Image (cartoon, rainbow, N blue to C red):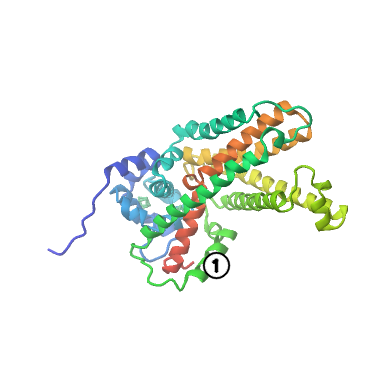
Amino acid sequence: MGDGTVFTPDIGFVRGLKEAGADTMKQCYQCATCSTVCDLTPSDNPFPRKEMIMAQWGLKDELAADPDIWLCHNCNDCSKYCPRGARPGDVLSVLRKAVIAENAVPRFMGTIVGNTKLLIVALLIPIVLFLCVLKNTGHLNIPEGDVVFSKFFPISYVDSIFVPLAGLVVLLFAVSVKRFWGKLNVNPYKLMAYSMLLPSLFETLKEIFIHKKFEKCDANKDRAWAHRLVMFGFIGLFIQTNWAVFNIYVLKWDSPYLKEDPNILLLLGSHGLVWLYYATFKLFGNASALLLLIGSLLVFANRMKDKGVNSVSSSFDWVFATMVFLVCITGILAEFLRFANNAQLAYPMYFVHLVCVFYIIAYLPYSKLAHMVYRTTAILYAKMAKRDVM
Ligand code: SF4
Ligand code: SF4
C-alpha cells in the first residue's frame, strides 16, 4: 500500500459552517459543474469544487490556507448552474467569514461581531462609553444656543476616543493579517521569493480599484457598481477625516468658524480663496457620503433582488450593509438638523452617528469590511505565487 494523506476532520467546524448558512454543502456530489462555469478560477486545480469537499470533510486548516476562497467574488454563477442546489458561491462566502473569525485578534471579538445575536452587545459598548464620557464631563444635556456639535461632544473628547481606537484597530488588524499570510504561505503555492511583491501589489490594487473581476460575473454582474460606490465612498471619507485632522491640528481651524480663522487667511491670502477651500472641503465630504449612501442602497437593492434566486444573504452581510447605511444617513441627517438649528433632534442624531462610526471602525477587522483587506492580501499572495494570473 502506498503512503496516504491523513486528514483530521473538525466536526465542530462543519457544524459551525452549517449554522452559518452553508448547510447546502452536503448536497454536493462533486460533479464539477461549478468549477467549469466559474470564470475566475485558474484551470489548474480549480475552485470551488475542491472547497466543497474540503468543507464537507471539515478540513479547517486546509481551508484557512486556501487563497482560492478569496479569488471568488461571490457572483454565484456556480450556484445558478449547480444541479444539486449546493450553492457553492454561498458556501465560499461562509468560508470567508469563518477565516476572518479564525484569524481575529482577540478571538472573542470575531465571535461577537460574527454572531448577529450579539449585535446589541457590540452596540452597547460605544453607547455606554459615550454616555459615561458625557456624564462625567457634564455634557449630558442639550446645549443652549445655536447647534454646534463640539458644544455637546467636544472635539478633544471625540479625538481622545477615536484616535487611540483607530491605532488599536490598525495594530490588531495587522496581527490578524500577518497570521493569515503565514497560513497562506504553507499551502501548495508556497512563496519562494518576494521579488514579485511590488509588481504584484500594483496589479492587485489596480484590479481592486477598477473591480475588473466583477465584469466577468454573469448572474450578479450589477453588484460591481454597488461595490465600487461603497469603496469610493469609504476612501473619500477616509481622506476627508484626515483632511479635517489637518485643518484642526495644523491650521488650527476652530470649527465651524473657518472663514474668519486668521491662520487660514494668512495661508491662503484672500477671503475668496478661504471660501473656496472651505467649500471644497465640505463638498468633498458630502460627495463621499453621497457615494456611500447610493452604494449601500444599491447593495440593499441587489440583495433583495437576488434573494432566493442567485445568492442567499446571511444576516452577517445584512448587518454590515445596514450599519454602512446608518453611518451615512445619520451623518447626513445630523448635518441637515444642524442647518435647521433643531437642537432637540440634531444632538441625539449626532450621538447615534458617532455610535455607528464607532461600530464601523472598532469592528473593522471582524466585520464584512475586513473582506476588503483579506481579499487584497489573498489576491496579492496568489499573484506572487502565480496562482492568480488573470
Ligand atoms: S457544488 Fe454543485 S456543481 Fe459543484 S461539484 Fe458540487 S454538485 Fe457539482
Ligand atoms: S461565486 Fe462566482 S467567482 Fe465564486 S466560485 Fe462561484 S462562479 Fe466562481
Residue placed at 84% from the left, 55% from the top? 273
**Spot occupied by residue 227 in the image (x, y as percentages of width and height):** 58, 51
Residue placed at 50% from the left, 42% from the top? 317
- Mark count: 1
Please name the residue that numbered disc 1 is placed on: 202
Quarter holding the N terminus is bottom left
**Spot occupied by residue 90 in the image (x, y as percentages of width and height):** 43, 46
Establish whether ligand 2 lies closer than 8 Å to the Cβ of label 1: no
**Spot occupied by residue 88 in the image (x, y as percentages of width and height):** 40, 49
Q: Amino acid at mark 1?
A: Phe
Q: Dividing the picture into quarters, in which one does residue 142 lie?
A: top right
Q: Is residue 39 visible?
A: no
**Spot occupied by residue 209 in the image (x, y as percentages of width and height):** 59, 59
Tell which of 116 and 310 is nearer to you.
116
Q: Is residue 57 positioned above or below 115 on the image? A: below
Q: Dividing the picture into quarters, in which one does residue 210 lie?
A: bottom right
Q: Is residue 41 visible?
A: yes
Position of residue 303 in the picture relative to residue 59 (left or right): right
Q: Is residue 332 positioned above or below 67 on the image? A: above
Tell which of 320 and 19 is nearer to you.
320
Position of residue 311 in the picture relative to residue 244 (left or right): left
